[in-house]
Each structure stands twice: as structure tokens, then as C-alpha cells.
Image (spheres, rainbow, N blue to C red):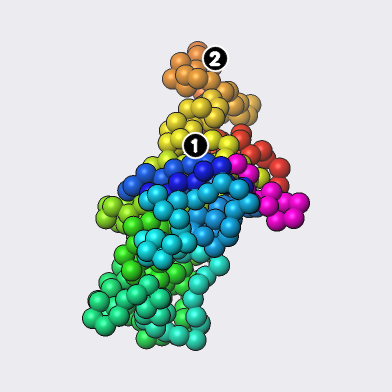
Amino acid sequence: MLGLQNLAKSFGQIKAVEGLSLELHRGEIFGLLGPNGAGKTTTVNLAVGLLRPDSGRATIAGEAPTASQTRKRIGVAPQALALYDDLTGEENIAFFGRLQGLSGAELREKAKWALEFVQLTDRRQNRVSAFSGGMKRRLNLAVAVVHDPELLLLDEPTAGVDPQSRHAIFNNILELRKMGRTILYTTHYMEEAQRLCDRVGIMDQGRLLALDTVDGLIAAHGGPDAVVAEWDWGEERIETPDPVEELAKLRGRGHLLRFRVERANLENVFLNLTGKHLRD
């Protein structure tokens, strides 16, 4: 549904995206995971034709993203909210729906559905300036889906939202997958990618470092599991490929107060690939 072939984009001396190639399959949620400044937003902008690559190309269902018929197949929820504060929620959705060629009864029907989908029907007549951060994020998603696009590009769609809105957005995204939509989901939150995504690509400094299912990434890059044992004298952490066998050994060493098993996860993968130094 979306193909990126050897994309490159620089801003002066900064290589924002360098040699990026990947393909999104129809009906999947593909997570693009990376620290701040990794090139995720630049990748989204290249994918939809908002930026022109220095080299390489992006295609949507085999066509250029800038073609007028192709644009109707795309829905984008940018990290920087694309909303008009002085308009109501309903007016925002109607405005963007008209940009996608909707009008009349079809526009009214799809705007109504989009508001219901993100649970904002009761606030449809309120100006967006009065919305909370979570409500704005949900409306941002409604604007992206109102014209029923096949491909959705969601750039950090839960940034700065409350837990309830985050949960609602998760449910929206999973429902969109059930509807057969293809979703590119950028984030730097490990738990989101692990919960939602069929496959995950990890990028840093403009390059794709690894791409696989979550389980595949953990197996390849997560490192060993660990058993943390608590004794009378303190705590001991033991990395091991077989936690059950290690626990049997520990029981023979004396009185074990308690223990826990720490499984490798996507956060381990992320830190092992991108490093642990701060990104300010």
C-alpha cells in the first residue's frame, strides 16, 4: 500500500532521512519507532508528498503521492495539530471533508460518523479552542478519517493526551485495522508500538536500524531475560536464557525471600539499537 524506496532528505548538513526503504502491507499497522529527531516526521512528510526527497521515491498503491486521485486515498493526522481553534469540532471536520471532495448528504453523513467514531458528538458545536488536549487529538484523528481513506499516517497521535483519550485512540486505531485500513503509526512510546503494531521499524538518525514483528525484534535484539532474587542481604540480578532453570538453582542456595522475572521487551530492543544517551 505504501512503498518507500531508498529515500533521502537533508536539511543543510543534517541528514534527516538517509537510504530509507520499507513497504507497508494492506491492512496492517506498521509502527515507526525512534527517539526525538530520528526522522519519523520527515518520513511521513516524504511519504505523502509534502516534502520532495533529495533521492529515492515514495509510492502509494504504486502511484505518486502527489497525484490528485492518490491524495484522496490518504488520511494524515500530523503531530502538529491540523485544526482551526475558532471553528467548532463539526466545522473543522466539514471543512477538511470538503477539501477531499465531499459535499451535501455524503459530507453530513461522514462528518456525523467521524464525530461518533472519536466520541465527540456531544461537543460538536463547541469551538476547538475550548477542547482539552485529548479532545483535540481525537478530533485530529476524525479529520484524517472523515473521507474514509485506505491509508492513514498517524504521526505521534497520542502526544500529550490523558490516559482516557489515549485508550480511546488505541481502540479507534484497532477498529480501523478491522475495517481493513493500512496505518503508518509513528511513536517513541514502546508500549504503544508493542500493543498496536503488526510490524515495527526502528529508526535513528534517519536510518532504519531494524524491521520485524515485535516478537522478532525482541528475539533478535532484546538481550537475555533476567531473574531478580531478593535475599536477606539484598537483591541479586542474574541474566539468563532459561529463567526456570535459574530459579531452581537459586532455591538450592538458601532462603529466597521473593523473586521476579524480567522478560526482554521492546524497550530493551530500542535502547540496545539506539543507545541510552539523552536526546535533548
Q: Position of residue 141 (x, y in %)?
A: 41, 66
Please, is residue 191 above or below residue 130 in the view? above
Does the magenta segment cover residue 3? no
**Of the residues shown, which amino acid type is indicated by label 2?**
Arg
Please, is residue 232 above or below residue 105 in the view? above
Q: Position of residue 89 (x, y in %)?
A: 40, 80
Q: Earlier in the sequence, mark 2 or mark 1?
A: 1
Residue that mark 2 sits on: 253
Residue that mark 1 sits on: 211
Residue at the spot x=45%, y=55% of the render?
Answer: 64
Crowdedness near tag 2: few (<14), some (14–19) or many (≥20) residues, C-alpha within 10 Å: few
Q: Quadrant of residue 75?
A: bottom left
Q: Kindly tell me whether residue 149 is visible in this rendering.
A: yes
Residue at the spot x=50%, y=54% of the render?
Answer: 47
Q: Quadrant of residue 12?
A: bottom right
Q: Secondary structure at mark 2?
A: loop
Q: Secondary structure at mark 1?
A: strand
Depth check: give the residue in front, 186 or 233. 186
Asked if labels 1 and 2 touch by Cβ distance under 8 angstroms, the answer is no
Q: Position of residue 80 (x, y in %)?
A: 55, 67
> What range is drawn magenta here?
9-19
Q: Position of residue 270 (x, y in %)?
A: 57, 39
**Of the residues shown, which amino acid type is indicated by label 1?**
Leu
Residue at the spot x=60%, y=41% of the render?
Answer: 19
Image depth: mark 2 or mark 1 in front: 1
